[in-house]
Each structure stands twice: as C-alpha cells, then as structure tokens.
Amino acid sequence: MLKDDSAVAALVGTRIYPELAEEGASTPYVVYSVVSNTPVDTKDSAPVDEAQLEVFSVADTYAAANDLADKVRTALSRQSQIVYETVTVQSVKYTNEVTEVSAERNLFISVQDYTARTTPVLTIANGAVGAFGLRKLNNAYTGAAIRVRNSNNDSEQDIGFTAAGDLDTTTLLAFVGSNDARVTTWYDQSGRGNNGTQTVTTDQPYIVTAGVLETSGGKAALRFETGTTGDPVFNSLEFDHTDFNPQTRLDKYLVTNTTDDRYLLWTGSEAGNKYGFNANSLSPNDLNIFGNYGSPDLYVNGVQKVAEYGVTTIGTIHSYLSGRVLQVVENATPTNWAEFHFSGYGSPTNAFGFQGKVLEIIIFNKDNSANREYLQNNINAYYDIY
C-alpha cells in the first residue's frame, strides 16, 4: 500500500522494509513490523485477521520524519478493500504516534501504531451454497472448474486451475484443438456439490469456439446463445438443488457481459410462474435488472428500487467496462418455484433464453449483506469492472 502511494513513493522510492532496513539504507525510509496477529474465524463469513502494526518513518531531521509520517498515515489510515494477490485489507485504523531520536545515528523516527483487518483472497465462497467461476473461488476446493465436451468426437474432460488460480486454458485448448468445447458441467466450488449441468448437447454453453477461447475483458467466459424465433434450442445450465429451490432468501453475485434484456437466472414453471433473478418485468414477480423493460423509476442513481419485485434491499448495478457488469441482488424471497436454471427453460419462441457471456455466479441462501463489500471488491479486483 505504501509503495503504491505516490506521495510516500516520492520521498522513499522503494525503501520500505519489513522489520529491519537494509544496512546503509539512504534516508528517508520506512520500516514496518507486525507486533501481534489475532485470527478471527467464523463459519458463515470470510475469516478476518486483526494485526497490530508499528510503522517507523525514519529521516535525518525532525521535520522530515514527521512529514513522511503524515504521508504514511494518509496512505494507510481508514483505507479499505485494497486487494492484492494474497490478502484483502478491510480496514486500517491509526491508533497512536510518538517521535523518537536515535542520537548515535543522528536519526529522527516517527513511530505509528495501526490496527489492520485483513482477509485472504479466493475464499469468497465461504458460506455460499453455489460458487461457479472460471477462477478458483475457494482455497479448500480441490476439484475442477468445468467439464467440457469436444464437439468433434463427443469426448469429455475436466478442466482445472493453474497454480495462480486461473482456468487452465492451456489444457483446455490442447484438448479441443480447432473444434468447439461446450460445457457439460460447471462445478460448484462451495463444497456443497450443487453443480450446474446440461446433458442436451445442443443446449450446452460454449467455452471454446472453433479453437478460440471465449473471453470477456481478457478473462475466460461461458457463452450462451439462443436460436431464432420458433427454434426451441438455447444454451442453459440446470441448478435443480434443494439449496436453491425452494428457499426463502437468496443473495446473488453475477458477472456477465451482455446487451440482452432477457432472463439471467430463471426460476419458475411452464405454467408461467416467474420467480427469481430475471432481466424482464413482464410480471410483478420478475426482477428487472437492466431496465430495458418497465418504468424508468425502477432506478435511482444506479440502485434498483426492487421492493416491488420480490426483494427488499438492494440490486446494485455497476457501470459497464467492455460490456461486463457486476450485479448484486439481496433478499430475494421467491416462492412456488418449480425449476432453477441459468438462462431459462425451453419455449417455442425462446422468450426465456439468455444471450451473452457469463464469468461468475455466487449464491447464498442466507443474509450475506455483511460481506457484500468484500465480495464486490474481490470480484472487481479480478475482473476490473468498475
């Protein structure tokens, strides 16, 4: 965090050291030390560590030491949700400061105390009942990301992750060659086994088309498409699990790239009951996501007023970047479900199909609002949506 702060870097460059400065280090410089570390582990939310830190701003003069300390404080104090490869900083609290003198070395040292709350990344599946991604969402998960079918010979193979936690596209493309790869299973990384599946070959979404990986913003993505009017073929995945259906509450995080205004997560029956996460307002029980249907007053400053549509708190729509959007829906309370699919169910006119790309779906069947900001920032750090 200090190296990324331009004001601190202007004074010390990269002279920021853990525990001890390099011998003969030029002043000014910064040394940081972990005084204590208290892990807090809970079942239903991301684990949080609380660390007590000391940060030493060292300079040749009193004024220079305190000037550096002021910039260090600005860079650290009250900062939150700064995501790196191994940790998310939830918050940093400034608690104390004193200035010391090292007479034998002719140095002035400003000593600041901080309390930092941190969480490990790639554990956003904690407490989820469904975690579907093309990156690793759970450090404890040891399975594959997806199972794919080679369109040339119908052979199938599981595709896992790289050491960095990304989809193993090297193995995927070697398996597919110049053919299409269509997804038969999107594995659930939550640990509950609530996989999304599709056995009908023509309904399986694409991950590779003619040997080319499907992507959005440089990240691997599943591509869903529908047929023409009168053609019942469409791409979908089925999630008919008791953790989803029926439930009194679902909190959902969805990353997509689409200009479609139709169904994203469909729940309902062929009798026409529309309950769940849809992008259509044909009935009062639908959830209008993009606002292409329905009244403009469904949105206020990008936040959806969704109490009328079966949810009582928030539907957060972030700005598009390269077509991608992060959609958050909380406190959905659907009833009378008969099915739970991604994209929709068959129809003679394909009225309920979804066209576009999907990168990630995370679902909780409980109140996850306390972790909303953590998940949103984790997702954004990986996909760079807003």
Image (spheres, helix red, strand yellow):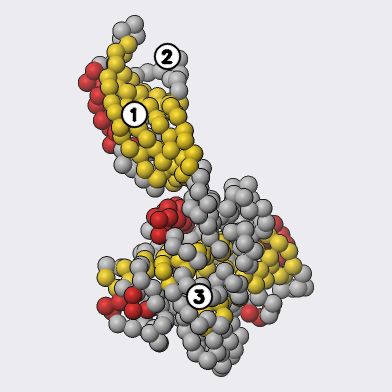
Residue 189 place in picture, x, y as percent: 60, 59
Q: Which residue is mark 3?
A: 265
Could you give the CA–CA distance between mark 3 and mark 1, rounded to whole angstroms? Answer: 47 Å
Mark closer to the chain start, 3 or 1 = 1
Quadrant housing the C terminus = bottom left
Give percent across and percent down for residue 53. Answer: 40, 30
Q: Position of residue 319 (x, y in %)?
A: 36, 64
Residue 325 seen in the current view: no
Q: Nearer the viewer, mark 3 or mark 1?
A: 1
In this view, 3 is above or below 80: above
Residue 214 lies in quadrant: bottom right
Rendered-image quadrant of the N terminus:
top left
| Pointer 3 local density, CA inside 10 Å: few below 14, some 14–19, many at least 20 | many
Q: Which residue is mark 1?
A: 113
Which marked residue is nearer to the observer: mark 1 or mark 2?
A: 1
Q: In terms of sequence position, does the residue under pointer 1 or pointer 2 come before the other?
A: 2
- Asked whether 268 or 27 is in front, the reply is 268
Q: Secondary structure at mark 1?
A: strand
Furthest-left residue in view? 63
Secondary structure, mark 2, is: loop
Label located before the other in sequence (2 or 3): 2
Image point (33%, 75%), residue name: 307
Give left or right: position of 196 versus 360.
right
Tally the marks.
Answer: 3
Pinpoint residue 145: horizontal percent, then vertical percent: 63, 60
Q: Mark 2 and 3 residues: CB-CB less than 8 Å, in contact?
A: no
Q: CA distance from mark 1 to mark 2?
A: 25 Å
Q: Residue at x 35, y 68 (%)?
A: 313
Q: Residues within 10 Å of mark 2 (few under 14, many from 20)?
A: few
Amino acid at the residue labelled 1: Asp
Q: Is residue 207 left or right of residue 373?
A: right
Q: Which mark is residue 24?
A: 2
